[in-house]
Image (cartoon, rainbow, N blue to C red):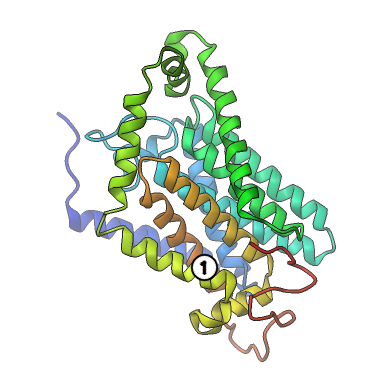
Amino acid sequence: MGPQPVHPPTLIACVLAVTAVLSAIALLGPWRRDPLGPPAAVCAINFAVLVGDLLTGTNLQFNALMGYTAVVGGRYYGLANIPFALLATSVLMGAAVAAEHLVRAGRRRLAVAVVTGLGVVATLLAGWPGVGSDFGGVIAFAPGIAVTALLVAGRKVSLLKLAGFSMLGGVAVSVIAVLDWLRPPQSQTHLGRFVGQVLDGTFWPMIGRKLGAMLHTLLSPNLMPIVLAGLVFLVFAVLRPGQVSAGLVPRAFARAPMLRAGLVGALASGVVGMLVNDSGTAVLSMAVALAVPLVLHAGVRLPGEVKPLGRAVDERGRHGDVLAGEV
């Protein structure tokens, strides 16, 4: 007898119950006194659940709301595209919170090292054969990590650098795929098999299917409004924070300038992930759906607060002596 279907009311009730528990942990824990505490708690929970799932066979993602399905899945192991978006955003935003505390303590180099170290570990877990086995995830993770680390270091980021970081991600995942291909055929994942397809020239149909699936999501009436609204918000939040969010974004950047680095990094990973994964806009929409509330919460005025924490930021949301990098 196969698994019984879950009725929508039961599913909705379970989602609401889990949401309530996670919200209670984030908002009622001892970290709630720090404006960055609840966002950090959400990132830590996401990271722990997703990495724990990766290390135990990704059982949570099979037939999940945002994972693989037995009907349309191309593979049933490793890191799915939507969980990748959650993992990447959680890692980059969580690393930005950690970097904020280190920069305040005058340890900027350590802050850059923490961002880079967490990003590299998460990337290896996402792309390693038999663990995450996510080809596009590695390509998308690399620019997000690099952009966040550069902005934390106070360096400028250009579109040319972003393209270079994406190519670096491509090189990294190619090395992983070749190492997988060198294993016996029965031990290879789809990464190693793809190398074999490239060598014998049979990879084009698969590339065509994935490209078609990605382009199809660009026309989705469900996803595109979320993506467009989120992109507009993020662009203004990064470039002109004073014009959005009723002052929440400028206050968040005044309290924690490194949040801008995490936000830009998450946006970079989301955009690249949208372009290199067959889930397309679903990847970017999920990154937006997680990153935006975290930033907005960091800007919420605390009870009894008289004046904003930190020094004022300019109209571009910059904290002159802490975050000098520009996109």
Residue 323 figure quarter: bottom right
Q: Residue 318, relative to residue 97: is it above or below? A: below
Q: Amino acid at mark 1?
A: Val
Q: Around disc 1, counting alpha carbons within 10 Å, would you say few (fewer than 14), some (14 to 19), or many (20 or more)?
A: few
Mark 1: secondary structure? helix
Q: Residue furthest right?
A: 106
Q: Give the residue drawn at x 69%, y 79%.
A: 313
Residue 243 position, x and y percent, is 52, 82
The quarter of the picture where the C terminus appears is bottom right
Q: Which residue is mark 1?
A: 235
- 88 left or right of 232 in image: right
- 22 left or right of 258 in image: left
Q: Residue 82, relative to residue 296: is it above or below? A: above
Q: Residue furthest bottom?
A: 306
Q: Give the residue drawn at x 56%, y 64%.
A: 39
Q: Residue furthest left?
A: 1
Which of the two residues, 73 or 219, is positioned nearer the viewer here?
219
- 321 left or right of 208 in image: right
Residue 220 figure quarter: bottom left
- 100 left or right of 55 in image: right
Residue 65 position, x and y percent, is 30, 48
Which of the two residues, 299 or 147, is positioned nearer the viewer here?
147
Q: Give the residue drawn at x 57%, y 61%.
A: 263
Which of the two residues, 326 or 92, is positioned nearer the viewer here?
326
Q: Give the residue drawn at x 53%, y 50%.
A: 269
Q: Residue furthest top?
A: 184
Which of the two residues, 137 or 155, is positioned nearer the viewer here?
155
